Amino acid sequence: MAKEKEIKTNAMRILEKKKIPYETLQYECDEFIDGVHTAEKTGAPFEQSFKTLVLQGRSGQYYVFVLPVAHQVQLKAAAKLVGEKSVEMIHVKDITAVTGYVRGGCSPLGMKKQYPLFLHKSALEFEKIYISGGRIGTTLYLRVQDLLAATGGKVGEF
């Protein structure tokens, strides 16, 4: 029997190019589900599962925020962190155009452009966290420090 070839995402290709180890968790899903339900499907602990949100500042600059799946981004704190007067979530219809990914499969790695990335400080409580793998049905498990190194990300509270 032929072995089914794993489809690589941009996020996986970036990690491999940088020789960063990661694990892949696959789950069955045909449409968007939120991070809480993704964690349930994969069996990943909620507190170690992180979602990726893209916000736009008043200046027009995009910012990537990676935070626990059960948390909501605090817009005032996020704006202060990035030095903007205000930030807001980008519209769902703009996700693919801005990131190259679809809603529910937006990875902090491998977007069309590398936007400033901020990782919620709670991630530092763990050696490894779960993030989107770059498509619906794929989750990556990797070291927090490797994610920061690969993205040039900063840690903050938002």
Image: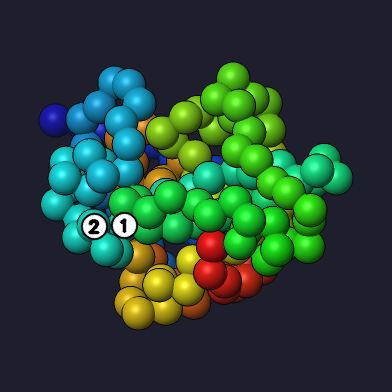
Q: Residue 83, how many percent across, how many down?
A: 78, 62
Residue 41, numbered label:
none
Q: How many marks?
A: 2
The residue carrying pointer 1 sits among few (fewer than 14), some (14 to 19) or many (20 or more) residues within 10 Å by Cα, namely many
Q: Is residue 88 shown left or right of residue 120?
A: right
Q: Is residue 93 shown left or right of residue 42?
A: right
The residue carrying pointer 2 sits among few (fewer than 14), some (14 to 19) or many (20 or more) residues within 10 Å by Cα, namely some
> Between marks 1 and 2, how big is the CA–CA gap?
5 Å
Q: Is residue 1 shown left or right of residue 59?
A: left
Q: Residue at x 36, y 32 (%)?
A: 136
| Closer to the camera in the image, 133 or 69 | 69
SS assignment at label 2: helix
| Closer to the camera in the image, 46 or 110 | 46
Q: Residue at x 71, y 42 (%)?
A: 56
* Amino acid under disc 1: Ser
Q: Residue 44, how many percent across, how many down?
A: 20, 56
Quarter holding the C terminus?
bottom right
Q: Residue at x 26, y 45 (%)?
A: 36
Q: Is residue 136 above or below residue 46?
A: above
Q: Is residue 105 above or below residue 76?
A: above
* Amino acid under disc 2: Phe
Residue 46, numbered label:
2
Q: Is residue 83 shown left or right of residue 32?
A: right
Q: Is residue 89 above or below residue 87?
A: above
Residue 49, numbered label:
1
Q: Are marks 1 and 2 in contact (CB under 8 Å)?
A: yes
What colouring does the structure picture have? Answer: rainbow
| Closer to the camera in the image, 10 or 84 | 84
Examine the image and state in which quarter residue 26 appears.
top left
Q: Residue 25, how many percent across, how many down?
A: 25, 49
